[in-house]
Image (spheres, grey):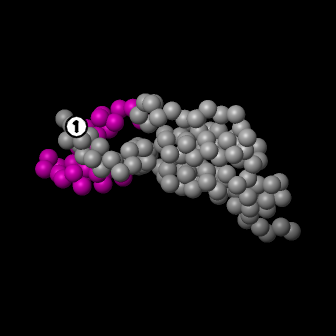
Amino acid sequence: MNLQHPNEEENASAASDGLPAHYAELKKAAGRSADWRARLAAVEELGHYPHRQVTDILKRLLENDPVYTVQEAAYRQLKTFGEQVSPPSKNRPEPFRGVSKIALRIKKSLPREHTYEEFRDKFRKMRIDVYDAFEGEKGEAFDEWLRGVWSNAK
């Protein structure tokens, strides 16, 4: 009788197939929509395993991730696997549409004399997916960008 946890069974099977022993966790991390750092770390780790399932995950991230840094890392890993892929474009639309409407809704839900910090915290709690994507996309300019979104929301 096998008493392994289902993820342990999946991981043991993955390791015997040429996938990393912790493949299930890496796959889950690669799909975390509200954590671009986890997706980036998963890309870097998966890049050590030139396996078809890994390639599929990396291609999905290259084509669909809202954060350029994650797309670029997936591209680099795929190239090391010998895959014929095009680099991601830096000239692309914002990761999410309607940010000004989201900001306005959040701003209206706060007291009239709220601070930027209160807005930032509520934005993060209410729309962590949007917050995280823009944080990853804007990098060091994120706080300045978000402050502009806050002040322009009317």
Secondary structure mostly seen in the magenta stretch: helix
For the point 61% across and 51% down, the residue is 43
For the point 29% across and 43% down, the residue is 145
Q: Is residue 138 left or right of residue 19?
A: left
* Mark 1 nearby-residue class (10 Å; few <14, some 14–19, many ≥20): some
Toward the left, the furthest residue is: 113
- Which quarter shows the C terminus? top left
Q: Position of residue 50 (x, y in %)?
A: 75, 48
Check if residue 49 falls in the magenta segment: no
Q: Position of residue 39 (x, y in %)?
A: 55, 51
Q: Amino acid at mark 1?
A: Ala
74 shown above or below 13: above
Query: Which residue, given by chain and number where applicable, does mark 1 sit on?
Result: 153
Q: Position of residue 109 (x, y in %)?
A: 24, 45
Residue 101 seen by the camera: yes
Q: Is residue 132 left or right of residue 24?
A: left
Check if residue 104 falls in the magenta segment: yes
Question: In this picture, which residue range is highlighted in magenta?
Answer: 96-125
Q: Quadrant of residue 88?
A: top right
121 shown above or below 99: below
Number of disc labels:
1
Q: Is residue 17 left or right of residue 6?
A: right
Q: Position of residue 6 (x, y in %)?
A: 73, 60
For the point 55% across and 41% down, the residue is 71
- Which quarter shows the N terminus? bottom right
For the point 77% across and 67% down, the residue is 4
Residue 105 seen by the camera: no
Q: Secondary structure at mark 1?
A: loop
32 or 111: nearer the eye? 32
Q: Is residue 68 left or right of residue 50?
A: left
